[in-house]
Image (cartoon, rainbow, N blue to C red):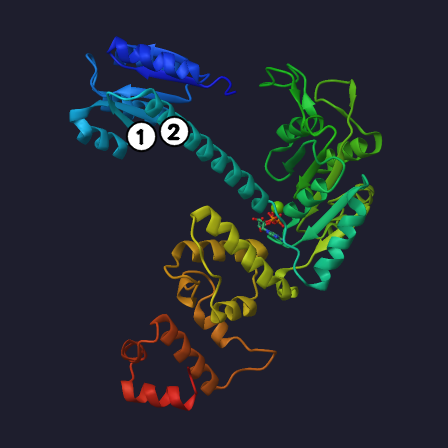
Amino acid sequence: MIENVNILVIDDEETIRDACRQILKKEGYSVKTAEDGIEGLRLFRTEFFHAVLLDLKLPDMDGMEILSQIKEEHPKTPVIIITGYASIDSAIEAMKRGASDYLSKPFSPEQLRLITKKSLDSRKMLIENIYLREELEKQVEFNMVIGKSTVMERVLDIVKRISSSDSTVLITGESGTGKEILAREIHNHSPRRNAPFVVVDCGALVETLFESELFGHVKGSFTGAHETKHGRFEVANGGTIFLDEISNISLNIQAKLLRVIQEREVTRVGSNKPIKVDVRILAATNENLADLVRKEKFREDLFYRLSVVPLNLPPLRERKEDIPFLIDHFINKYCKKTRKDLKGVSPSVKKALMEYDWPGNIRELENTIERAVVLTKGEKIELEDLVYHGISASSSLLLPVGGKYKSLNDIEKEYIKIVLQAQHGNKSRTAKILKIDRKTLMAKIKKYKIQ
Ligand SMILES: Nc1ncnc2c1ncn2[C@@H]1O[C@H](COP(=O)(O)OP(=O)(O)OP(=O)(O)O)[C@@H](O)[C@H]1O
Ligand SMILES: [Mg+2]
């Protein structure tokens, strides 16, 4: 039994409207009819329809125009064109403009049934596909890659052990090392996973606004407080709050935060009634908090309360074994986004990416891959797809390997290989770029045994 499928029939011929109504109702669909375009569009906008049957020749409006409006407002709603036998051309034109199928008059009940069912099925599939793709993208978006480096394995091990507890975690690491994604990972593995994960950027607001952002305020507590507001701690109730860039909070708010951690309750600005909250606290910083404690810019007691479990994410240059896994992950992520189907990176790209030091850490690697995926025209990402970024071919070329500087011959060989590859093996073009003649190039290729 098909439930609640609503179909709109727009046709000026009464016999057609009646026939459609009877046949489709027998199939279990609800049917609404309109005898002209204006009435049809009015109905279309007041109710939800799963499909529309539309006559192209109407007394008041051009059917094509109605089709365009329907497609603009609800692109996924299938529109089946009803057309006289003589006007197959316009039916084809309508299909080009997004109609899903057409019925030419006179049609049999069987034809109507089949074509309607086909359109409804394809709509369902389209919507399911979009839904699945979005789900998949979300999974990839917050999917944290754990590579093969021992440092990261240790981090993961701690994460596993603490995820079921409520302990406060202080995540440290340079910018772009994945502090936020790690915090989400901890939340997603905790019993709180179905409750909110609330991010607070502690550097983003001036002090007075920040206090009300965190703890809320009551109506009239300061100019501009027109309504009572729930703070982030209240919003996160039952879940996790992530205090990002924690080093930025003032000493005054540090004192208040300490109280929240100790008492597990918040007091809205302008109120004296504390509210109980059940929130797990995760914090992150890319500064050395212990240093700030020594300089008396950060309260020592708060520092100890926050760093019950300290987790340090090492910079990417100290865990280069993870790079290949991250490359695969980001290629996958951005191929899905751009609907490309790439076969990975060429060996020279992999080498360049492994040799680079990544001052911007994983974020920089991710941006590099994203740009390369967009730029590349081939099946694989080549060095030339990277040159718009900080890592040009030359930086990897000139960097010492394993602490040893390269000889001029080594560099000449590598450079010839890079240009040859970028020119897809075309020796005349390569020679021209290198400003040597083709014979000299051939000799060097032979000397260096370049494939
Ligand atoms: N292990 C990982 N697996 C997959 N993606 C990662 C990983 N680590 C970081 N990323 C990605 O790199 C980017 C930066 O990560 P994130 O925002 O967590 O870093 P951060 O340490 O909070 O940086 P900042 O200090 O600049 O705020 C994000 O897009 C994130 O998805
Ligand atoms: Mg961050």
Q: Are marks 1 and 2 in contact (CB under 8 Å)?
A: yes
Q: Mark 2 belongs to which amino acid? A: Ser
Q: Specify the quadrant of the image occupied by residue 301.
A: top right
Q: Residues within 10 Å of mark 2 (few under 14, many from 20)?
A: many
Tell me if residue 238 can be seen. Answer: yes
Horizontal side, residue 9 vs residue 408: left or right = left
- Residue at x 64%, y 32% (from the top left corner): 207
Q: Which mark is residue 101?
A: 1
Distance between the alpha carbons at the discs numbered 1 and 2: 7 Å
Q: Is disc 2 placed on a helix, strand or loop?
A: helix
* Residue 362 at x, y percent in the picture: 58, 56
Horizontal side, residue 377 vs residue 256: left or right = left
Q: Is disc 1 placed on a helix, strand or loop?
A: strand
- The residue singled out by tag 2 in the image is 119
Q: Specify the quadrant of the image occupied by residue 87.
A: top left
* Residue 388 at x, y percent in the picture: 41, 61
